[in-house]
Image (cartoon, rainbow, N blue to C red):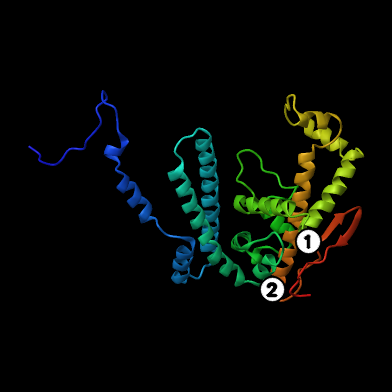
Amino acid sequence: MSTQPQPIEPDDNEEFNEEEFIPGHLIRETFSFFDFNQRTLNRDVRQMEVILDRRSARELVNLYYDLQKSRLAYNNQVRDLKKAESPHELLDYYSNVFHMLEKSLVGPLDNFGDQYTVGRWAKSQYGIGPVITAGLIAHIDIQKAPTAGSIWRFAGIDPTLKWNKGEKRPFNGQLKTLTWKIGQSFMKFHNNENCFYGHLYKMDKERRTAKNEAGDYADFAKEILTTKNWGNNPTRAHLESGKLPPAQIDAQARRFSAKIFLSHYHAVAYQDFHGVPAPRPYIIEHGGHVHEIPIPNNPFA
């Protein structure tokens, strides 16, 4: 007969006292096990002295955003627990741990970006940080990008790109997400005088809004209206009036600012790698005129 101690389980007919089975000192020891702070974590990461390549940087960028996504989800759960007046401290603690892990990745990715001229240039732009910069360098192989348009296409923001059902995705999903984050950042900082691309977003949104109000997008709105059953919602009302919904105008302006940034990114990366300027200028149509937008802080100017 076994003499091993058997696990104690509460009787279904007895009132369960949590403290009898999870003593307070065990909870305190659990917290003590994770008793580290941001400074300690950053120091430990620095002491590893790991030199990243493009592939490892790509995985760390993915890890950063995975941690961020989980942290934000935990924060939402903590908020709901607080509203319900339920214990939330442990979940809040782990949210803070995820936040520290997330922040500890910034330094290595920042160092990775500094290894490249285009990385240093990108980080000089207000609204672009070390994580986005590292992601761009990790995903974009300038040897395979002869023009800015090839980057737009790889990022999934070429309007001529079609992805039919059953076909392999013709763009890089992670790069497309980074491009969306870039547009969001420029939108967020568009009122900051130092955000060059944020100003482009603002100007383009104003231009598109004026054209929308003038009915210039009526045919496009009619075309969109036929793509699906919109139901009774504000989007349908805008389209039936011959106008694009404000959210779509805003999305177009964000995409515009991101595309110009990627054009400039290509020009800097191309000249740094090949030693000569990009094959042709990045020409855009803006405000009814065709002109070249100069690269801010251009290291080759």
The quadrant holding residue 299 is bottom right
Q: Nearer the viewer, mark 2 or mark 1?
A: 1
Question: For numbered disc 2, what is the local secondary structure?
Answer: helix
Depth check, front residue: 212 or 140: 212
Q: Is residue 237 left or right of residue 108?
A: right
Amino acid marked by disc 2: Asp
Q: Identify the residue position indicated by label 2 in the image.
A: 272
**Where does residue 157 sit, x and y in percent of width and height?**
71, 50
Residue at x 85% of width, y 46% of height:
208
Q: Quadrant of the C terminus?
A: bottom right
Q: Identify the residue position indicated by label 1 in the image.
A: 196
Q: CA distance from mark 2 to mark 1?
A: 22 Å
Q: Residues within 10 Å of mark 2 (few under 14, many from 20)?
A: some
Question: For numbered disc 1, what is the local secondary structure?
Answer: helix
Q: Residues within 10 Å of mark 1 (few under 14, many from 20)?
A: many
Depth check, front residue: 161 or 283: 283
Residue at x 83% of width, y 32% of height:
222
In this view of the protein, can residue 181 be seen by the observer? yes
The quadrant holding residue 154 is bottom right
